[in-house]
Image (cartoon, grey):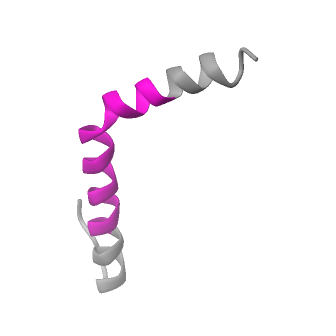
Amino acid sequence: MAASSPLGHNLALLLTAVKDWAETHFDEVHEARERYDTEILDD
């Protein structure tokens, strides 16, 4: 990810970390959403 300024570079680092976290925890998030949909929304 290219950044044109120090501020942009800092933002790019943060967004990369969020992307990495989301990719690592995708299955857990999906399972939690499924549980929510069945336990909370079906009541």
**37 shown above or below 20:** above
User: In front: 40, or 25?
Assistant: 40
User: In front: 25, or 42?
Assistant: 42
The x and y percentages for residue 29 are 41, 34
The residue segment tinted magenta is 12-32
Q: Quadrant of residue 14?
A: bottom left
What's the residue at 31%, 77% (across, down)? Answer: 10
1 to the left or right of 42: left
User: In front: 6, or 22?
Assistant: 22
43 to the left or right of 16: right
Asked if residue 21 lies in the magenta stretch, the reply is yes
Residue ranking furthest to the right: 43
Q: Which quadrant does the C terminus fall into?
A: top right
Asked if residue 25 lies in the magenta stretch, the reply is yes
Q: Quadrant of residue 5?
A: bottom left
The x and y percentages for residue 33 are 52, 27
The x and y percentages for residue 12 are 30, 66
Instruction: Give the prevailing secondary structure in the magenta stretch.
Output: helix
**9 shown above or below 16:** below
